[in-house]
Amino acid sequence: MRIRTVLRRDFILRSGAAVAAGLFGTPARARQATEAPQTPARTPVILVLGDSLSAEYGLPRGSGWVALLEKKLAQEKIPATVVNASISGETTSGGRARLPALLAQHHPSVVVIELGGNDALRGLALQHTEENLVAMVQAAQQAGAKVLLVGMQVPPNYGAAYTQRFAALFPKVARAHKAALVPFLLAGVADGPDPTASFQPDRIHPNAQAQPRLLANVWPQLVKLLR
């Protein structure tokens, strides 16, 4: 009888403890073990979608403005990863086709769109270029990214009307869709006092000495989006 009574008392004490735990919650140590760990903040990704002007065409590797951008971010102690998805010869149609997969793969915080120059060189319709730029800006924004649209200009030998309309495309799209804008990537290079000194022999692509100037044109607008 004594053994049976002790066992019964032990059972009652254990049952009471279990009920109390159920009523008043799990002890703090047990609760902490079941809580999900906090996810660390993700490093922002800057996706550059451009043509040969951003793809280091004819330049030593690491000397293009996008590569210089990575170094600038490190110097300024701004944590960000740069993904250069630029391809020489790319048009707005090609960029528009490639962008959805790039957005899904890299989940960028900022998308830099530097396209349109090859559209003009190929004589593509301005309306077609504008539609592609709009589609890319909207796709990036819908994916949660901020957009920096990089403008381009064409030489005056294309005709005054075409030259003006082409240059106006970029601010028009940027205003309509609330994107940041670099009016002219080659400012201070193509319109400098001695343009030939800043270009490769093809007179189309800036040389390595001109790349810091290209970055200087992009940086003020880009850093605003990052900060």
Image (tube, rainbow, N blue to C red):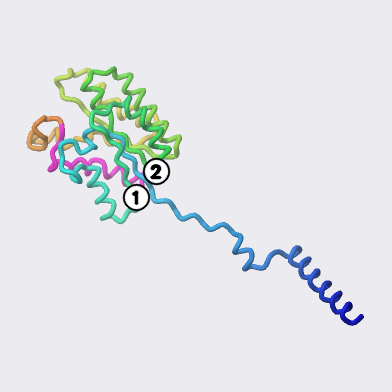
Say if mark 1 contacts mark 2, CB within 8 Å.
yes
Q: Quadrant of residue 128?
A: top left
Give how far across and how far down residue 135 sits, in percent. Answer: 39, 27
Give how far across and how far down residue 127 sits, in percent. Answer: 32, 19
**Residue 76 in the image: above or below residue 28:** above
**Residue 133 in the image: above or below residue 188:** above
Disc with the residue nearer the chain's start (1 vs 2): 1
Q: Quadrant of residue 209?
A: top left
C-alpha span from label 1 to label 2? 9 Å
Q: Residue 80 carries which label?
A: 1
SS for dot 2: loop
- The residue stretch that appears in magenta: 205-227
Give the prevailing secondary structure in the magenta stretch.
helix
Residue depicted at x 92% and y 80%: 1
Q: Quadrant of residue 86?
A: top left
Residue depicted at x 30% and y 56%: 77
Q: Dot 2 corresponds to which residue?
A: 109
Residue depicted at x 27% and y 49%: 70
